[in-house]
Amino acid sequence: MADQAVLTMEQVEPWLSTLFPEAQATLSVSPLTADASTRRYFRVQWRPSGTGRAISRVIMVCDPWLETETPDFITVARHLAASGVRVPAIEGMIPASGWMCLEDFGDRALADAWRDAAKPERLVWGQRALDAVVRMHTTATQHYDAACPAFHLAFDVPKLLSELQHFRLHAIEGLWQQELTDDERDVFDAACHPLCAHLEAQPQYFCHRDYHGWNIMAQDKTVGILDFQDARMGPQPYDVVSLLVDRRTPSLLGRDVSTALVQYYLDRFEAESGQRVDRAAFDELFELVAVQRCIKAIGTFAAMHMIYGRSQYLPYIEPTLTYLRPLVQRHAMLASLEAVLYRYTPLAG
């Protein structure tokens, strides 16, 4: 991974001058927060001569790639844009440096818009975010693109199980310092398998994978989508769960807004696809997806702390456990998983 912590004006000015000849000496470069990503992002700004309006772009620094290659970020961006999902335009790149010059969606994430808004406006912002999910589940899913890696990846048993094993490694054995034997690890994996197999068996839709309020930018009355390069096929509720269940979002939105947003998604999906959705079946699958994703998220929060020293994600573990507790108790297929979670984690409270 290109771990370039600092990007200087001297590095980017020659390149940007070729992309934007009007850029003047007022060019500035500043780092941006990248949430839980290992990529690096920088905002560049300049004022064209004779105007008072600043222009900005975002430089994304990732792994270098060969001129003959096309990174997943680019192919997924093309597919989403063609499907009517707003993603940043790619205005230039230097493959050998791992640089991409992207349209700037600003600093206001959907999570910020939700935090600052009254309840009616929170509902509206959630609807805007779900409109993009509907496009991913209809147009993006229906129009197969062999060049798009999402169509060759899925939330299958190996992927889902690996995410739960990541939780076991970094949360149970790392953060909570539980010493598991090889036999106990096998018991944990076996307890996870029924859930993973059930989710793999569901009809598959185009999924962003990390569709939460920190990867969605709120601009005027629209949303722009980021961090989509790991898209893959998965169960229908996956991105809806990701949006409504991530971190402290459930307590921020409240049950009534979350319930209204799920109904909004279903109404819009049925209208766009012409398919009827069984609400009871969707709700059950929503909860099962939420169990897997909550466990996966806790593993990510723990790994951010244990590997990268990013302790700012640790406070999200308790609200995620709070959301998870009643879910694992409601579904018979989760009995073995509930037992191992209660044995090795603070799930009991």
Image: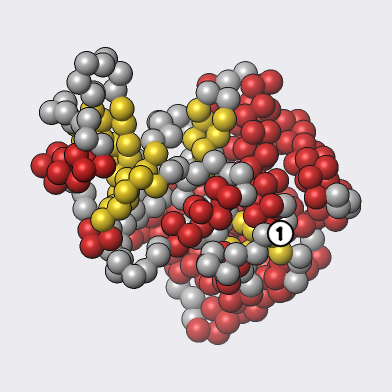
Quarter of image, res 255: top right
Q: Residues within 10 Å of mark 1 (few under 14, many from 20)?
A: some
Residue at image position (69%, 20%) is: 120
Left or right of 177: which side holds 48?
left
**To which residue does mark 1 refer?**
142
Q: Position of residue 188 (x, y in %)?
A: 60, 74
Q: Position of residue 293 (x, y in %)?
A: 60, 57
Quarter of image, res 24: top left
Q: Vertically, is 231 above or below 47? A: below
Residue at image position (60%, 64%) is: 145
Left or right of 267: which side holds 17?
left
Q: Vertically, is 335 above or below 131? A: below
* Nearer to the camera, 204 or 201: 204
* Nearer to the camera, 227 or 349: 227
Image quadrant occupied by the N terminus: bottom left
Q: Vertically, is 185 above or below 70? A: below
